Structure formats: structure tokens, C-alpha cells
Image (spheres, rainbow, N blue to C red):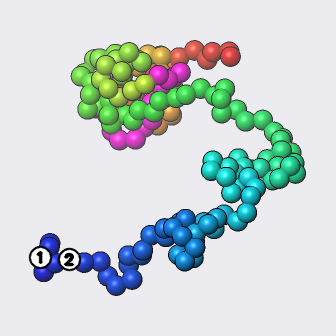
């Protein structure tokens, strides 16, 4: 078998329907669009969701409830194991140093440290939210934590 001898399977390729190519083609004259009307014209047709003047479904259904997603804080998550890899003994961990260490990319309202993995280095954590397990591990390694003040939004 060579590249030049490869062929698609029988029946895998179809002839392109040539619309508007004479009456004898079976799809001449109106080309399967019927006679007159909005859908027969080029560029014609209705927008998605249009129901012929009937009140569309998205307007018939009730809009209820409140969704907090646009108001909630965007929180970056960092594991204790990655702090152990990127920081030296005695370093300070805050939003700026986490961005410099490329553990936090983009804009976030807060950073939360999670206790996934282990830590052996003595770190000073400032202005970050810390989970209970992460707090135990950092303090066990000899580090200190000063958590961020809760903002009243």
C-alpha cells in the first residue's frame, strides 16, 4: 500500500448536489426552495427563536430568582506543595510574591491556600485566605499566618 494508491471506501464520497442546474437535474428552477416567500429569497429566513409572530419560548417562560455569579469574589487557589517548590525558607507569601512566582496569573480578588501536599519551609503568609489543613501544615513547619481582613462589600 502506498500513499498514491489510497482511495476512500465505496459509498464514502457523495456527488455534490448542483442546485439550479437545469430542469432535468431534479433540482433546477426553484432549487428546492419552493415558490416565493421569505425563505425562498437569498439572505432570507428568520432569526433563531422566531416563532412566526407567536410569543417566543424565551419570553414565555418566567424569569425568576437571583444569580450571584456576577457579584461573587474571584478567588485564586494555591496548594501548599507548590509554595514548598517555589519559595525559599523564611520568604513572605502574599499576592505580589505569588504573582512573581507565577503561581497566580490574572486578576483575582483574593488568594486561598489549600492544604494539598506537604511543606517543610518556614514561610510568612500575609493577606491570604487559608484553609484549616493548610494552616496546620504551615504552622507545623514553623511559619506564621496573618489572614486578610474581611471586606464589607
Residue 107 against residue 12 in the figure, above or below: above
What residue do we see at 68% from left, 15% from top? 152
Q: Which mark is residue 2?
A: 1
Q: Nearer the viewer, residue 146 or 34?
A: 34
Residue 151 against residue 75 in the figure, above or below: above
Q: CA distance from mark 1 to mark 2?
A: 7 Å
> Is residue 134 rendered to the left or right of residue 27?
left
Element type where label 1 sits in the image: loop
Residue furthest to the left: 2
Residue 129 placed where, x, y %?
A: 51, 25
Residue 46 placed where, x, y %?
A: 72, 49
Residue 84 placed where, x, y %?
A: 29, 31
- Looking at the rendering, the stretch of residues picked out in magenta corresponds to 107-124
Q: What residue is disc 2 on?
A: 6
Q: Quadrant of the C terminus?
A: top right
Residue furthest to the bottom: 10
Amino acid at each position: 500500500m502506498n500513499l498514491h494508491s489510497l482511495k476512500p471506501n465505496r459509498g464514502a464520497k457523495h456527488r455534490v448536489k448542483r442546485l439550479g442546474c437545469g430542469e432535468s437535474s431534479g433540482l433546477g428552477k426553484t432549487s428546492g426552495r419552493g415558490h416565493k416567500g421569505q425563505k425562498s429569497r437569498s439572505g432570507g429566513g428568520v432569526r433563531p427563536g422566531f416563532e412566526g409572530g407567536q410569543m417566543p419560548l424565551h419570553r414565555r417562560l418566567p424569569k425568576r430568582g437571583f444569580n450571584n455569579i456576577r457579584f461573587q469574589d474571584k478567588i485564586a487557589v494555591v496548594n501548599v506543595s507548590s509554595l514548598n517548590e517555589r519559595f525559599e525558607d523564611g520568604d513572605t507569601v502574599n499576592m505580589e510574591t505569588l504573582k512573581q512566582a507565577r503561581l497566580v496569573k490574572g486578576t483575582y480578588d483574593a488568594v486561598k491556600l489549600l492544604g494539598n501536599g506537604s511543606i517543610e519551609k518556614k514561610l510568612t503568609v500575609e493577606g491570604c485566605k487559608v484553609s484549616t489543613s493548610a494552616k496546620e501544615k504551615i504552622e507545623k513547619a514553623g511559619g506564621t499566618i496573618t489572614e486578610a481582613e474581611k471586606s464589607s462589600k
